[in-house]
Structure formats: C-alpha cells, structure tokens
Image: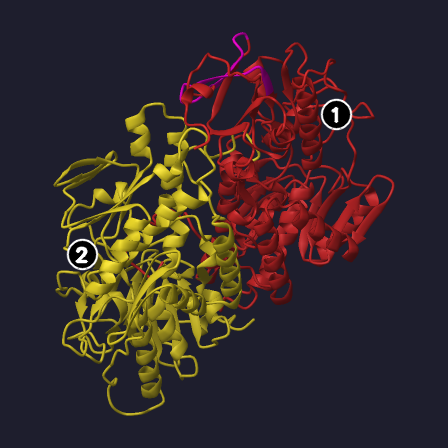
Chain colours: A red, B yellow
Amino acid sequence: MADADPGRSPLERPGTAPAAPHVVIIGGGFGGIACAKALARAPVTVTLIDRNNYHLFQPLLYQVATAALSPADIAEPIRKMLRHQRNAEVLLAEVTGIDTRRKAVLTEDGARIPYDTLVIATGSVYNYFGNDAWAEHAPGLKTIDNARAIRTRVLMGFECAERESNAARRQALMTSVIIGGGPTGVEMAGSIAELARHALARDFRHIDPREARVVLVEAGPRILSAFPEELSAYALQRLEALGVEVRTGEAVEDVTAEGVRLPGGFLAANAMVWGAGIRASPADRWLGIAPDRAGRIPVSDRLEVAGFPGIYAIGDTVAAPGASGAPLPGLAQVAKQQGEHLGRELARQARGASGAVAPFAFRNRGNTAIIGRHAAVFDFGKRRLKGYPAWVLWAVVHVYLLVAFEQRVLVSLQWLWRYVTFQRGARLITGVPKEPQTAQGSA
Amino acid sequence: MADADPGRSPLERPGTAPAAPHVVIIGGGFGGIACAKALARAPVTVTLIDRNNYHLFQPLLYQVATAALSPADIAEPIRKMLRHQRNAEVLLAEVTGIDTRRKAVLTEDGARIPYDTLVIATGSVYNYFGNDAWAEHAPGLKTIDNARAIRTRVLMGFECAERESNAARRQALMTSVIIGGGPTGVEMAGSIAELARHALARDFRHIDPREARVVLVEAGPRILSAFPEELSAYALQRLEALGVEVRTGEAVEDVTAEGVRLPGGFLAANAMVWGAGIRASPADRWLGIAPDRAGRIPVSDRLEVAGFPGIYAIGDTVAAPGASGAPLPGLAQVAKQQGEHLGRELARQARGASGAVAPFAFRNRGNTAIIGRHAAVFDFGKRRLKGYPAWVLWAVVHVYLLVAFEQRVLVSLQWLWRYVTFQRGARLITGVPKEPQTAQGSA
C-alpha cells in the first residue's frame, strides 16, 4: 500500500503541513484535472477536492439528457484519472469555506485541509437571475442528476400523452421548452427534436411523437450570439428544418410546473430546460471579495486572485483578462489551458525557479456547437465551418477529447450504431417517485 | 400515424371492448415479453402494462450494483421491443387491482383497462420475512434504483474510509455484508471482492481497498443450496480464495444502519445487500386468493389461476407444478418458457382452435451462477460444469440472451476491456443527498 502512514498525509493531521509544498485544487473539472496532471512530476503534494467522485465531460451531457448516452459514458472516476500520480490524492468532500489567514480549506464534514498554494477551479452553475424557484421546473444542465431528471421528464411526457385523451393536455405533455439560445440550448433543442421524430417515431399507438413541439426561447436578437451571424443564421435554419420553434427577442417572464410565460402569452409545456446564462461558483463568498455581475472573481493575467498571494483561480469561476481585454469566455478549452499553464508554472516554481507565474495567453482552438445530424458549426476566429464537415469534425474532436480509451471506443460505437439506426440506447425512465420494492414487472 | 383514432383503443374508452379479443399482460419481464411476442401474428389486441418503461435483464443487475455496467446496458425500452408488433401496445402504469367480475385491470391513475384474457406476470420482490424495516438498510437487487443505491453505498464506503482516521470506523466503512447465499448473493459477494482487490486497488492513498471485508451470510447449511453439493463446495472454495468470509448456518437477527446482528455478535458494516428469499408480487391480493408461504399464487399445469377462467399467471409470481410435482423455481428461463408457451396457446385459441391451453412442460436449459473471474457453475441436471469453461459458457449465454444487438456488442466490448484491464467503467456515485446546482467541480 503506497501511503499507509497517516502521518504523511495533510488530511489525517489537520494543521501540520506535509513535507513537500502542498497544492490544494478545488474542483475536478477540465481546469482542476489539467492543473493536477501538470504537477505530476513536481516536488509537491497535490490534493484535488471535488464533491463528486467523477470528472464529467460536460460538453456531452446533453446526450445523456436526451437518452443517447449513459452517464458512465461521459464520466470518469477522478481517482482513476490520478491513480498513477503518486504525488496526488483525491478527496471527495464539499468545500464550505477558505481560512485564508491560516491557509486551510474547510469542508462540510468539519475537516481543515491546509495548503501552501490553493487553486480554485469550481466552475459555474446556471443563473436564474434571482428567480431560483424556476430551477425546480426548468433545471439547467450541469450535473448527471440534472441530465437524468430532464431525460425522465421528456420521456415521461410522451408516456403520459399516450394515455391522455384530452387533446390540449396531450399537446402540452409533448411540448418541450428550452430557455436560452446558447450552444447548450441549441444542442438540447435539436437533440429533443431528433429524439421525437426518429428514435420514438414508431413507439406509440395513440400519439405521433413527430407532433412533439420543441420551442427554443432566446431573449437576445439571435441564437448562438457568441458566434458570427452567418453561423447563427445557419443554426436557425437547421433547427427550423428539424421542426424546432425558435423565438428570439422573447424574455421568459415566469416558469411554473405547467409551462413558461412569455411576452406573447403562456406556453403550456411538460419539459423545460434552462440554459440562459451561468453564474460562477461561490469562490467569491469563500474569499469575501466582490465578483462581477456573472459571479466571477477577478484574477490577474497570472491567474492569481488580486490581494490573495498564493491563491489562484481558473476556468468558469474567474474573469480572466483576454487578449482583447474582455474576460475570456467560460469554455472547457479555456479552463483546460489555464489549468495546464498554471500547473506547469507551479511545477517550475516548486523546482526552485525564481519569478512569478508567467502570464496566461489563450490559444483559441475553435468554438463549436452541434445542431443535429450532419449539422454543426465551428468558429476558428478567421475561418469558419458549418454543415456536414463541421459535424464530422465535431464528432472526431469530442470522441478524441473523451478522457478514457474505453469511453472513446464505447461512445464511438454507440454513435455509429445510432447513426445507422436512429435509435437511442439509454431511454430509461428512472428515479420517478415510488420506485422501490413493490412488485410489478421485471424492473 | 398508426392509430390516431382513440376509438380503436381499449385504453381511451374504458368499458368498450376492442374489435379483436383483448389480451392484457401485466409485467414486462421475461414472461410477459415472451408472451406478448408469441402473440405477434395472432388476431388479438395485446396491451402490455408495466410500471417501468423498460425490460430489465435482471441476471446482470449485480454488475450495475458493482459498477461494471451501466443501467442502459441491461435495460431495453419495452416500446422499442414491441414497436413493430402492430397488434400490441404498451402502457406505463401502476396496477392497483383487478375487477374480475367486470374483467378490467385497475391502475393507479384511475384507468380501467378491460380484458378478455388476462396474463399476470408481475414477478417477485425480496422477502424480509416480516422485517420490512431492514429493506432501508439492506436493499435487495430487483430494480435499477436498487442497483444504483448499492453501487453508491459501496463506493461511498471507500471514499469515507479514505478520510477516516479511526481504525475501527474505517474497517466498518470497508465492510460489506451480503445476506443470502443464493446465486445473487454469491455473485454480489464475488463481484464486490473483485471490485475492491482489482478495480480500486491503487486508487486510494490512506486505505488499501484490498483490506475490504466482504461477508456472505447464509442461514442454511451451504451456499447455492439449489445446486449439487459438489458445485456449492466449489463456489465456497472460490469465494474464500477471493477473500470472502462465508458464514453458513447463521441467520440474521437484526439489520440496522450500522450493520447486522448475527448469532455470533454484531457485525459493523457499511454496505448491506439482501438476497435471502423472494416473495411473489401482489397478484394474490388482486385476486383475493391465498398464496403459498412464498406469496406465489397456485396455477394449474395449464397456467390458469384456479377458479378464474381466462386469467393466467406465469413466472416468479406463480407456483406452477413441475415434473417432480414440486413447484418450478423462480428462474428467468422458466418465466420465458411459460410466456412463450402461453402466448402460442392463446394465439392458437384466437385462431379458432378448440381445446384449452395445453399443459406446460419445463425444459431445463441449465441452472447457473457466477462467482467471479474464471469461476462459474452450471447444473444441467445430469451433467455439471464448473471453473473456466463454465465461466466462458456463462458469458456467452448471457451476452447472447441480452435483448438488443446494440447491448450485446457494448456489453461484450466492456467485458473484454474489463477482462484485460481489471477496470470498472461505471464507478459513479450519484443520487447522493444534495446533488443539485451548487457550484463545485465540473460535475
């Protein structure tokens, strides 16, 4: 057993620092994992803390929400990712605060994890702009449980519609509303539309899933506003070809269990998904500093939190100055590059090199969104790509980026299978109230 | 749209019988599905009712519980299975009773589904012998949610042990107790032991998962009591080689959140799994007849419920007389053969053939249980098989029996991958209280 002696661990003896400088990373997302891995050969002890035991490949979470993939296909146990990195350990815990004076991270179960260097990579959550009650009816798409809840909601809608004799109620049960026309919203809208018109097409006897209504609501003037207008227009045209109703310039006024209220009136719906704007993690409260309106904490181009030497922050949770001066967008590739950069720099320092962390410069690898079968968009800054080639590139890139080899193979195979059959393998309705052991059916 | 006119459906207009004789099947397990499929070309209308939207391949559920497979790998949407069977429809509903006088099935949402012929295939649940409070601490292994709960429990035990400094508590967190030495208990014990000594072996820094304790408790004199003594002895020897503590002749006296009380004293444990005896579904209450001590309702060798002409019952829920006179065991192959037989016979009758349902004769295809890597047992009655060849045969048979082609390929591939790497792909801790959108990590 590698490390049987509790004495060597900073976790077992709170307060006593480990022999090697202790780098604590909060968050096992793209940024946190990249940072930990970049420290692999450095003379430091790394502790990565996450509230989940897995790293989630969020860009594909919408496929779990639409029954295309299983959670395990896009999630990798963090321990497995770092198992061979002898200087790293993983802690499953909920962080509740940071004692910056005594340099310790506080967790819900009352532990104090001392640090010499702290990296905050806690990501972001969806922002309901003060209407947090809406979250219950229109979950965002951040966690596996979110995705499962949405999947169950969408599939249950069709099941209930099948036995609903009232036409209006039946239509409502077959109506999905996606709020927010960003990449997630576009992906969800396209994916639900394809689920209804292909995967479920012949499954029912009293309803036609192809009559399902998918509405994408965007408060701004166009969807995919972060992309060039040309690509937004293409995405709009492709979504409408899939039968998605796109409503731009309409801000949601209310979200209830029955549907959403829009300027045009109330829209009765069964499944509602929130993708309108994100809010950064609670790092601002932990540090007691003022975030920007998106909840992001300010960091220098060296990724250090202003006024907190030795505390760095990366990814969705920070507003890091980009080349243009505007903060860098909350993208996986930004978080990943920041994590790699910071890890390399901290390793350099640990090896005794002088000087602070070098400024971080983002290299844009291309911003992408997928609308559906044969339809995606890529924005590389100067160059752009759309349609079939973009869709192929999207698939290649995402399979490649998937963490483990096993996942890559399985996901490729499932995509290939689904491409040929139009089927969805993970159409399970689970976690519905009253699942437990009462007898009926085999399940 | 196949069937837009609600008038054609027995579901939409309760009380009015459909044109063709209406066969209602309760339960989408092995028996119910086989019966529905056997009626494919018969001049009848088939309605299959299940409380879940999927058929579950229960023989592999233990692999979900031990993080080897994802739920979707072993579950197939019932609608998908019957989508091409024009005379069949699927209803997702919870049956609450049967109105035998007016010949209608009653569901929770107040619907009445009239039937001409009724097939009850509602399976079984675990039997806590009057101690239903134990179910909360030691779930059985019948549903996907059961399996997820057990998986989360086992994995969380190691996570908590990793940060537990008290040696006794740490040992308890790494202790699993499986109650019941039948095939499910043996499979769970072997699989948890392999999870600990292989998949998790190098994942932790402060504990050695190989020190995990797996205890299999059996009240009877030997495990796998349904098998020949020779195979029981082999299973025992293989389990002990895996480090499993097998305790025969010990009946559990109490199950609490902290562990189980045995004649030998209290055994502190984290994960407990119940596999000791099953109880048939509530069909007896629905019909108001006296079941046997296992809750099974008596049927004739024609699978008809005594005193209820036109009502048949198959699978785990019945005590059907076998060749020896003793009731047939609750096995998937029994349910499947009964379903096929009954479906064929009902189809024959519907085509106008005279005479009652022919007596059912069970053809034993071999009873099997898997202990672990390279270790399984088969009992074909006269012949027996154990060890490596039995293990290979077990794998081939189970992959072959998996419903959909896609599942076969994916499961084969995952097994192959795990065989080479000793890894487990589905090690996700989900559904733990307080998952929702609070920011931390990528997941």
Rendered view: B157 above or below B20: above
B236 left or right, relative to A205 = left
Which disc is residue A327 wearing? 1
The residue range painted magenta reads A101-118
Give the Cα separation between the discs numbered 1 and 2. 68 Å
Residue type, mark 1 in image: Pro
Q: Pick the residue in front: A180 or A396.
A: A396
Q: Residue at x 50, y 48 (%)?
A: B425
Packing grade of label 2 (10 A; few <14, some 14-19, many >=20) is: many
Q: Looking at the rendering, which quadrant does residue B443 occupy?
A: top right
Any magenta on residue A39? no
In the rendered view, would you say A322 is above or below B344? above
Q: To which chain does the residue with label 2 belong?
A: B
Q: Quadrant of the N terminus of chain B?
A: bottom right
Q: Nearer the viewer, mark 1 or mark 2?
A: 2
Q: Indicate which disc residue B222 carries.
A: 2
Q: Secondary structure at mark 1?
A: loop
| Residue A99 location (% of width, % of height) | 52, 12
B213 in relation to B11, above or below: above
x then y, percent, for residue A427: 50, 57
Among the 4 quarters of the image, the one containing residue B329: bottom left
For the question of whether residue B190 can be seen, the reply is yes
| Image quadrant in which you'd find residue B51 | bottom left
